[in-house]
Image (cartoon, rainbow, N blue to C red):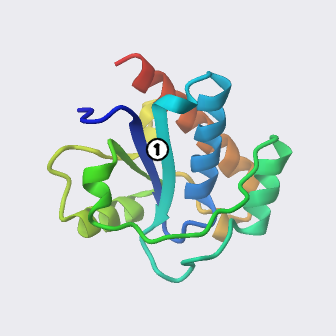
Amino acid sequence: MKKHDKIRILFVCHGNICRSPMAEYVMRDMVEQAGLSGQFEIASAATSFEEIGNPVYPPARRELQKHGIGCAGHAARHMEKSDYAKYDYLVGMDDYNLRNMRHICGGDPAGKIYKLMSFTGSNAIVDDPWYTGEFAHVYQQIHEGCAAMLRQILHT
């Protein structure tokens, strides 16, 4: 699947201020801890336009900080059709995200769109903490999904 020197991952959620940036920075931390930073390009994006340019939502930023993970400099951006060609993995948090991602990309002909929790063998969604307020729970889901995804990538 790789046509380039790095494994490229794009995490996607509705606004790119809670779940997808949490996943981006959790995965960056994991690959850094494994000494693999140079082998990955990791980013995140939104399927909507309402939060474009905004930083990580403060409760999400605080949850990352509790685990020693920074997210300074993040600015929400919209997913573009061209992202489909650029990234090896386009990873959504829930079924609504996946539907919107396929719409933006014009489908998924190469099978590159995934739901994060599918890497754990589950069809579960990553709950939206914007509505639930459960940022610690969402962090745990994201950590579990990212760890499983990284294991799968490294063993394929």
Is 1 left, or right, of 16 in this rendering?
left
In what quadrant of the picture does the N terminus appear? top left
How far across and down, in percent of the image, does residue 152 sit? 42, 24
Q: Residue at x 76, y 59 (%)?
A: 61
Q: Residue furthest right?
A: 66
**Within-10-Å neighbours for mark 1: few <14, some 14–19, many 20+:** many
Farthest residue to the bottom: give it: 50
86 on left or right of 76: left
- Residue behind mark 1: 116
How far across and how far down the image is residue 56, in percent? 68, 65
Observer-nearest of 2 and 48: 2
Question: Who's the residue at 40% across and 63% down the image?
Answer: 97
127 left or right, relative to 39: right
- Name which quarter of the figure residue 73 lies in: bottom right
Q: In this view, which residue lies farthest toward the left?
A: 109
Q: In this view, does 89 lie above or below 99?
A: above
- Using the rendered image of the protein, determine whether residue 134 is visible from the camera's viewpoint: no
Instruction: Answer left or right for 42 relative to 105.
Output: right
In the depicted structure, whether residue 70 falls above or below residue 60: above
On the image, the x and y values in percent for residue 151 come to: 49, 22
Total marks placed? 1
Quadrant in the rendering for residue 74: bottom right
Tell me what residue is drawn at x 85 percent, y 46 percent.
66
Q: Is residue 78 visible to us here?
A: yes
* Quarter of the C terminus within the rendering: top left
Q: Under tag 1, what secondary structure?
A: helix
Residue at point 32% right, 41% down?
88
In the image, what residue type sits under mark 1?
Answer: Leu
Question: Percent position (x, y) of residue 59?
Answer: 78, 63
